[in-house]
Image: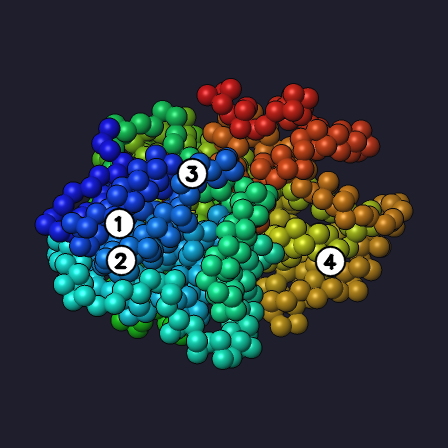
Amino acid sequence: MSQPVTVTRDGNVAIVTIDNPPVNAMSFHVREPLHARLLELRDDSSVEALVLACAGRTFVAGADITEFGKPIQYPFLPEIIDLIETFQKPTVAAVHGTALGGGLELAMGCHFRVAEASAKMGLPEVKLGILPGAGGTQRLPRLVGPSKALKMIVSGTPIGAKDALASGLVDEVVDGDLLANAIRFAREKAASKATLIAVSQRDDKLAPVRANMAAFDAEIAEVLKKSKGLDAPKTCAQSVRNALTMPFAEAATAERNFFHELVKGDQSRAQRHLFFAEREANKVPGVGKDDKPRKIAKVGVIGAGTMGGGISMSFVNGGIPVTILEMSDEALKRGLGVIEKNYGISVSRGSLTEEAKAKRMSMFKGTTDYADLADCDLIIEAVFEEMGVKEKVFGTLDKIAKPGAILASNTSYLDVNEIAKFTSRPQDVLGMHFFSPANVMKLLEIVRGSKTAPDVIATAIAVGKAIGKVPVVVGVCHGFVGNRMLGARGAEAEDLLLEGATPAQADKVFTDFGWPMGTYQMWDLAGLDIGWRTRKSLGKTAAIGDALCEQGRYGQKTGKGYYLYPDGRTPVSDPEVEALIVEKAREKGINRRDISNEEITERMMYPMINEGARILEEGIAIRSSDIDTVWVNGYGFPVGKGGPMFWAELVGLPKIVERLDYWYGKTGKEVYNPSPLLRKLAAQNGSFADATKAAA
Ligand code: 3HC
Ligand code: NAI
């Protein structure tokens, strides 16, 4: 293994190179030699300037997140950065790839930053439920100004080299050899003998903002609007504000204290869990390094409806051209029209230029002829959710698709193994289940059939990531991971109303928890008629849901459902619905009573956890963290709670089993019957992660 820190010389310039694959995180085994070498170089009079560079694919991508939550070993990152600031000779960071978090903080400890044109820089700590803890909230405002720093730190979104140059974060952007240019830059600075000012000592961008703190506080209030009950964004903003009101050393100490507080908290633990969960989800048993992804240069999509349109946009947005097939010219025109309208909205909001819109539209080809799909590498079906229709589509695809083409279904519930049987190539068939709106939602459930080839799974993961999705591989069952658990979450929704809850009360329990909306709001958004039709086809009924549909109340699209929508979007409680609930309860002889918020949580969220445990037990999900990734990216489960399975452990598995047992005893309903796995883990004080390890 190569040395994590090496020092080389180019004349009087010393080059310190960090080499800690894969992303040069600032682990203890880097910090220790880095600190020692810097001490030597600071006091070495033969060194006139220092360049700090990295080997491999990126500059330092941050502190080593795996060390969080454990005792941190000396030397600490802030000490190293403070040490660089004491250099009385020019120090230059040579940035390539990404300088993130502690990496950017390290670069800001240098007097100067030289970056490759493709480099990205940012402080994404907020996404891990923390704040930059090595001076980032203090040095970034001094370099780019407090307003821009506030936005960057609270959003966690990195900026490109061009923007970094314009805003003062970097001093030079280079096209050619980065290291050679950084050395040249350092040598020029040494020769110029100009006064060196450490970033912590700069004040020119802070002073004007100090003069109007009320305006800055208004900016803070604006950027925090989307902070969704999370602690980290607020703390980030407070710390940036401190840069304006406190001397550097005092504000830096406060920042460090905030960091230690946040890193211990449940929200940061949850968000770090999700960071690793998303990456773990790419590791699939039976799919190895030898299963090279097939090349996907052209995609076919069948059906230009709600999902087909959004799926097509996702690929085109990711730079892959799409041929869309519909049943008629009219349906095709309608589908392409919706796509064009959606891009038009982006143009009007300023997130897309007219030119980019035209370019994207030129990447769609519409057709009604299957022969036009013959050269596609991947074909995704998004037609009606009926096995008969899927049978016809896959039978035809089998005849026209080129050998090796991947055939995917976007089905929400149907059996992917059965769909694969409609072809003579089940090894090339799988489910690629996108979520609505498909051009926005990040989750991609990849449904692995019993015969799906490993390289087909590898391809689906690779292409999913390439178009910005978060892929999670799941097994075949009704509704896969997400929709199956969603069914369990809503199983008691009708009875809770009959027994005494109101839609507004139950939905508030959800929004207070951090969900973007509650169950009844979600049903109104999706359209109540869909469930009604399904119930009718299965001979099932739901007293309230059916009555609403009989009155033409299909949800938002008809202006009313469980709620009224006077402005088309905002739900308002409707006394008529409450009267309807009371009437239906009376018809059924149910005495309505006060339902507590705890009861709503227990009867909606605990069955969801129970179903998750069953899914894990059956091997439909590979690991519990995959279930968390599904729920956070597909259904808006609050990130600060880490996903349903992580949250269940925070609540305590014994408590969940005890309450499920209680409700099972009272109602006899199967949704409450604790899964054997859940019962076992609760009895052993175990965790879902242990169960995954044991199964592996
Ligand atoms: N610490 C430890 N491991 C890390 C890491 C970090 N900061 N960043 C990435 N890794 C690991 C990943 O877990 C993954 O491990 P695996 O191969 O075992 O699954 C491996 O490095 C490669 O990561 P990706 O799969 O994410 O690689 P990509 O090329 O897709 O992305 C990246 C590279 C953009 C650097 C991305 O990894 C990333 O965003 N990393 C996190 C950056 C970050 O959040 N930095 C701030 C850390 S907190 C901090 O610095 C605190 C400070 O203020 C004190
Ligand atoms: P949709 O009704 O909006 O669109 C279906 C489109 O397919 C229509 O435009 C129709 O003309 C076309 N079509 C039907 N049969 C066809 C055929 N034989 N050849 C070519 N085109 C044909 O339906 P939606 O909502 O887009 O759903 C499509 C699939 O995606 C279904 O399997 C559904 O279960 C699934 N799905 C739906 C989600 C949603 O939220 N709507 C979410 C995830 C999956």
Q: Dot 4, crowdedness within 10 Å: few (<14), some or many (≥20)? A: some
Q: Residue at x 21, y 64 (%)?
A: 172
**Of all residues shown, which one is farthest toward the left?**
11
Q: Are marks 2 and 1 in contact (CB under 8 Å)?
A: yes
Circle 4 or circle 3, nearest the eye: 3
Marks 2 and 4, how far apart at CA: 64 Å
Marks 1 and 4, how far apart at CA: 64 Å
Marks 3 and 1, how far apart at CA: 19 Å
Q: As shown in the figure, which amino acid type bears the numbered disc 2?
A: Gln
**Mark 3 vs 2, N-terminal side:** 3
Q: Residue at x 79, y 51 (%)?
A: 501
Q: Are marks 3 and 2 in contact (CB under 8 Å)?
A: no
**Mark 2 vs 4, N-terminal side:** 2
SS class of the residue under badge 4?
A: helix
Mark 2 residue's CB less than 8 Å from ligand 1:
no
Residue 472: quadrant of the picture = top left
Q: Are marks 2 and 4 in contact (CB under 8 Å)?
A: no
Residue ID for mark 2: 88
Q: As shown in the figure, which amino acid type bears the numbered disc 1?
A: Arg
Residue ID for mark 3: 74
